[in-house]
Amino acid sequence: MSGPHHQHPHDHTEPPAEVVLRVKALESLLVEKGLVDPAAIDALIDAYETKIGPRNGAKVVARAWIDAEFKKWLLQDATAAIASLGYTGRQGEHMKVVENTPQVHNLVVCTLCSCYPWPVLGLPPVWYKSAPYRARAVADPRGVLKEFDTALGEHVQIRVWDSTSEIRYLVLPERPAGTDKWSEEQLAALVTRNSMIGVERAKSPREVGKS
Amino acid sequence: MNGVHDLGGMHGFARVSAEPESAEPVFHAEWERRIFGLLLAAGALRKWNIDMVRFAREQQHPVDYLQRSYYESWLAGLEKLLVETGLVTAEELATGKAAGLAEEDLCKHRLQAEQVAAGLSHGSPTTMSADTPPRFRPGDRVRARNRHPLGHTREPRYLRGRAGVIHEYHGAHAFPDLSAEGVRVGRHLYSVCFEASELWGENANGNSAVHVDLWEDYLERV
């Protein structure tokens, strides 16, 4: 990816000190009223910081790359195939997997809010939730892809998936060349979060220092 | 509502500003962690659903919506929901002091740490039954209806009045326009494919299409 681009202040997370205080006050208030338990908040944070993230999705992709039957299942019934690897639930109740090929490139966005497949990718990056991406992914996908240094020929059809319902989309990136004898684990290391959103390709063996 | 949250196709936001993937933390500050956990924990009280959460955020003033960071919007939305549903009073919110304990019935639903993993792995499926059979089939030509409801909707503005083709039928799912008002009814949901040239005319990217999930209520036959 290219270096930092033009940064609008709201892309950062430096809120006024007032926001920090309001969050603290709100938590204290809800705890005092008996409505929330701080230990449950800790557990929720921990789940998304340590357990539920894009390594889950990478395992799904790597399995699809080495197992043709699994891939077929994944493309037909993604929810069930993904559940078979243990990834289910919140913001991934209804999953679809869309496959990149030499002719087709898929890109996922949520123009209306920030819908994202949590069980396989975790919580979305800041740019995915930002106005520039949400505004432009549907109208100028080639331009957006260029900003991620992803150039596609005119012959490649781009399919943008705007996540307006509770269906969540995961891109199955193309398996990189030169990985024929790689293990599932080695392959998973090539699968980036961004490749499963569709803004980049999976890493090449060269990029991870193996070729 | 025709809110500023409905961003598809807007100009003027410049480039996508992305932190390198390997360097981006899940949360950027402690207060982001807390408001994230707080909203999910409060959601377990079942006073609202996901469409109400979205609608609460959409109703921020457009200037605030664009100016605030993502989790600041979560905070604003949560404060609004808490007061609207009576979980806290405006006065409690302003002073930060509880006027008393919440009702026992509510506290019974308070999310416990040991319930978190199971709750997340179960989620909240939105499939429901519908009263009528689906009107459309894959391959049918449809048009997104030109409608401008004041309430919550998941029909983005950029495709209203545009024609597309039914790509896939997803079954019946809770209809968000009514769900945001607390009414859960199942309506047929479809993936509809719109050619970029239909959406963006002479300014369209070549060889591209947009797939959007749309409920039957948003569609008419061409």
Image (spheres, rainbow, N blue to C red):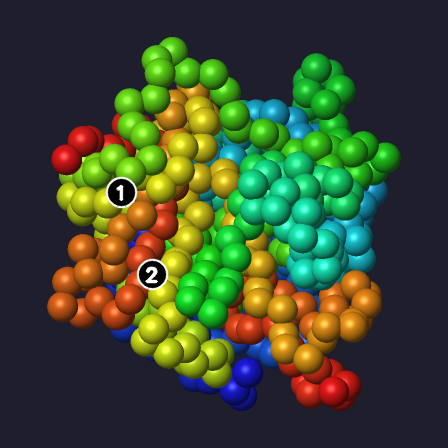
Question: In terms of secondary structure, where does tag 1 sit?
Answer: strand
Which sits in the foreground, A126 or A73? A73
Q: Which callout, 2 or 1, points to the residue nearer the camera? A: 1
Residue A200 picture location, percent across and down: 53, 73
Residue B121: x and y in percent read 73, 37
Query: Label 2 belongs to which residue?
Result: A138
Q: Residue at x 68, y 20 (%)?
A: B106
| Residue A82 location (% of width, % of height) | 68, 44
Front residue of B9/A26: it is B9
Q: Secondary structure at mark 2?
A: loop
Q: Residue at horizontal 52%, vertical 87%?
A: A2
The amino acid type, in three-letter code, at marker 1 is Val
Choose between A19 and B124: the one closer to the eye. Answer: B124
Tell me the tag on residue B165. 1
Q: Residue at x 68, y 80 (%)?
A: A178
Q: Chain of mark 1?
A: B
Disc 2 residue type? Val
Does residue B170 sit above or below B26 in this rendering? above
Question: Hey, which quadrant is residue B66 in on the image?
Answer: bottom left
**Quarter that holds the N terminus of chain B:** top left
Q: How many neighbours does mark 1 have within 10 angstroms: few (below 14), some (14-19), or many (20 or more)?
A: many
Whole-angstrom CA distance, mark 2 to mark 1, is 17 Å
Which percent across, then down, holds residue A159?
39, 59
Q: Residues within 10 Å of mark 2 (few under 14, many from 20)?
A: many
Residue B39 seen in the current view: no
